[in-house]
Image: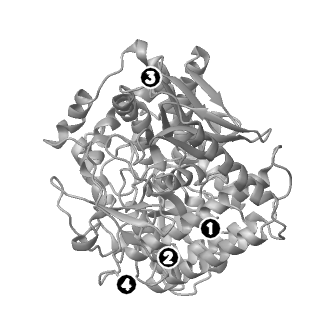
């Protein structure tokens, strides 16, 4: 680790000073009461920028506008409702215990900490579980059409990592319906004049003046104009960075530029190596495929996962009798069966495919079979629950999942890492708040299914509006240093000019594809010291070649998607390097970070709590990354080896 590959230095420890002490169930109420308030007249004098209009950003902008702040909102889509949250399918968790099956706030808290392999903060996770019950009431009041039982009560189903039924859903369109609820609230505030909306604008840098976040530099993606926007606080709600792998379940536009630019301005980046591989995706179909399609984890409620018992059995699934099938999740994990957490289900699928028992082209697939559910419930009942998902699968693959099993394989989905934030959701730059998947979140080393929507809406509707007020109570923060604004804008223009004037012969997409394959092969579902060192040798070489040989057509002052993609790929190179440094330094396995050198006799992730029970917060430095450790102390949950057997 002291050689040039993977080099870093260690700085002072970092600590979350905002989390209250005392009984865990009282901490959020204690923090809300201690937070300073801003009176209504003063709120009208304060400006807040919110970047991103997904569940976190949309709900935050709407709520801050309703509270009376002057909000300016940005998104790179042509409408706020096109944010990637709309693609979420299966559901949203909440500890309401409508089923009477033993759920509680404490059980949701415990399941989340355990599911994250004991690498999350207790205070944050408990608050998330508390707030979850309010989210459902908020969404229902907005008219979100959650599924209901025959008697009219809200229905729930199970998701991975839990033995209770706590996931509220709207068929396979939960993200879409929740986003439309937030979008309605946002549009109401736009009409009221409290929120100013800028669509088709991309944030390209953060303005930091006198040590505080005071604005953003954005590019109008239609005209190419570079704009500066100032405020008393900035909120980033720009999602995750899974597209560093090129092939992922994320929309093609999802990128890391906003949070990476903030990182280079001083915001620490936490746990970048924690990447979630989702077990239920449609397998890769060809060399030139540009993205992957998620099949909701909710399908594992009724679908059974299996592969042929014998290596190389190429018979159609209908011709393989029960005795010739291996329902491997049910066999290995009898207590949770097909509902084990995503990291465990993904590695199990990889293992059986590595054994030569995979199905479909290249043997990179396993079956997700609904024959039992159709026989038990009837086709109509299955169609009512999952019909749109089945239709989507058939349109993409040309196969009827009612007549034959789906073929699925793990793919990059969600990133648990992100900008470091304290209990107030404030980064290491005062005035810069980060919410939703853009922060390093409440999920530790692995996110349980149906918890992304929960966290995004908890942050936007309930947490940020309280905690940002504590910061803004000391505002307005006066004039912004013109030199700081000019420096940020000049940097953006120079970067754009460097890309456009480069006389190369390769597209940014071709470099992105090569980087993504490198990351999947060397820092994907399984990592080793050897693979990570290979990646850290190749990434700088590829990045240097990119800046020397990339070809970006078109002009700066126009709609130019080639320019947009090139800027995003450039940031992915830098992020990829930090991800590999983080993965190399963490020689344990935990959750979505699986080091092949660190596993138990059964092939399960083997943590090293003595040396790695901390959040790795990385500071940007021109001399290489600087590691700051935030120790994780557990008072209410005992750290133990995860078992779902």
- Report if the CB atoms under discs 2 and 3 are less than 8 Å apart: no
Say the numbered circle drawn on residue 350: 2
Say the numbered circle drawn on residue 182: none
Q: Which residue is mark 3?
A: 141
Give 326 or 497, whichever is nearer the viewer: 497
172 vs 2, left or right, is right
Disc 4 or 1, which lies upstream in sequence?
1
**Distance between the alpha carbons at the discs numbered 3 and 4:** 50 Å
Report crowding for label 4: few under 14, some 14 to 19, many 20 or more residues within 10 A (C-alpha): some
Disc 1 is placed on an element classified as loop
Report crowding for label 3: few under 14, some 14 to 19, many 20 or more residues within 10 A (C-alpha): few
Counting from the top left corner in percent of width and height, residue 227 is at: 69, 37
From the viewer's perspective, is the residue at label 4 or at label 2 nearer? 4
Disc 3 is placed on an element classified as helix
Say the numbered circle drawn on residue 597: 4
Disc 3 or 4, which lies upstream in sequence?
3
**Residue found at x 60% / y 75%:** 539
From the viewer's perspective, is the residue at label 4 or at label 1 nearer? 4
- Report if the CB atoms under discs 4 and 2 are less than 8 Å apart: no
Q: Which residue is mark 1?
A: 283
Give 29 or 97, whichever is nearer the viewer: 29
């Amino acid at each position: 680790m002291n050689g040039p590959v993977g080099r870093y230095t260690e700085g002072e420890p970092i600590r979350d000073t905002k989390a209250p002490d005392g009984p865990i169930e009282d901490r959020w109420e204690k923090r809300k009461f201690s937070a300073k308030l801003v009176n209504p007249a003063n709120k009208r004098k304060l400006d807040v920028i919110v970047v991103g209009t997904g569940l976190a950003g949309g709900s935050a902008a709407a709520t801050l506008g309703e509270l009376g702040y002057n909000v300016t909102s940005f998104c790179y889509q042509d409408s706020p409702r096109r944010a990637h949250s709309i693609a979420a399918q299966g559901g949203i968790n909440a500890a309401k215990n409508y089923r009477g099956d033993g759920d509680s706030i404490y059980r949701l808290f415990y399941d989340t900490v355990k599911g994250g392999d004991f690498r999350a903060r207790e205070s944050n996770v408990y608050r998330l579980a508390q707030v979850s019950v309010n989210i459902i009431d908020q969404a229902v009041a907005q008219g979100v059409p959650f599924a209901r039982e025959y008697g009219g009560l809200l229905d729930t189903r199970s998701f991975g990592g839990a033995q209770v039924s706590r996931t509220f859903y709207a068929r396979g369109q939960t993200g879409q319906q929740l986003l439309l609820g937030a979008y309605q609230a946002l549009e109401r505030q736009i009409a009221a004049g409290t929120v100013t909306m800028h669509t088709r604008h991309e944030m390209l840098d953060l303005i930091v003046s006198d040590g505080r976040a005071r604005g953003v530099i954005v590019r109008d993606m239609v005209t190419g104009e570079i704009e500066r926007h100032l405020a008393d606080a900035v909120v980033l709600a720009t999602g995750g960075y899974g597209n560093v792998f090129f092939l992922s379940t994320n929309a093609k536009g999802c990128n890391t530029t906003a949070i990476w630019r903030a990182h280079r301005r001083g915001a620490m980046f936490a746990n970048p190596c924690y990447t979630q591989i989702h077990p239920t995706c449609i397998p890769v179909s060809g060399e030139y495929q540009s993205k992957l399609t998620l099949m909701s984890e909710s399908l594992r409620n009724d679908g059974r996962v299996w592969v042929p018992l014998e290596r190389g059995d190429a018979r159609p699934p209908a011709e393989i009798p029960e005795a010739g099938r291996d329902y491997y999740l049910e066999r290995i994990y009898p207590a949770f069966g097909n509902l084990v957490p995503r990291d465990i289900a993904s590695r199990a699928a990889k293992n059986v495919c590595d054994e030569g028992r995979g199905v479909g082209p290249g043997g990179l697939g396993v079956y997700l079979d609904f024959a039992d559910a159709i026989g038990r419930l009837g086709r109509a009942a299955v169609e009512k629950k999952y019909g749109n998902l089945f239709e989507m699968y058939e349109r993409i693959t040309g196969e009827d999942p009612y007549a034959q099993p789906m073929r699925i394989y793990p793919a990059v989905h969600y990133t648990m890492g992100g900008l470091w934030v304290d209990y107030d959701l404030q980064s290491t730059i005062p005035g810069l708040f980060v919410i939703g998947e853009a922060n390093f979140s409440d999920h530790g080393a692995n996110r349980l299914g149906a918890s992304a929507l929960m966290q995004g809406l908890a942050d936007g509707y309930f947490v940020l509006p309280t905690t940002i007020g504590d910061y803004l109570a000391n505002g307005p923060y006066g004039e912004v240093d013109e030199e700081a604004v000019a420096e940020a804008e000049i940097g953006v223009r120079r970067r754009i000019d460097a890309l456009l004037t480069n006389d190369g012969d390769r597209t940014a997409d071709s470099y992105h594809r090569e980087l993504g394959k490198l990351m999947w092969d060397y820092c994907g579902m399984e990592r080793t010291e050897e693979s990570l060192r290979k990646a850290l040798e190749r990434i700088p070489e590829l990045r240097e070649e990119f800046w020397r040989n990339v070809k970006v057509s078109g002009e700066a002052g126009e709609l130019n998607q080639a320019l947009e993609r090139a800027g995003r790929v450039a940031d992915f190179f830098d992020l990829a390097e930090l991800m590999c440094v983080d993965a190399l330094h963490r020689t344990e396995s935990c959750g979505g970070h699986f080091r092949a050198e660190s596993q138990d006799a059964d092939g399960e992730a083997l943590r090293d709590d003595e040396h790695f029970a901390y959040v790795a917060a990385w500071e940007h430095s021109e001399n290489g990354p600087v590691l700051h450790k935030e120790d994780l102390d557990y008072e209410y949950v005992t750290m133990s080896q995860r078992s779902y057997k």
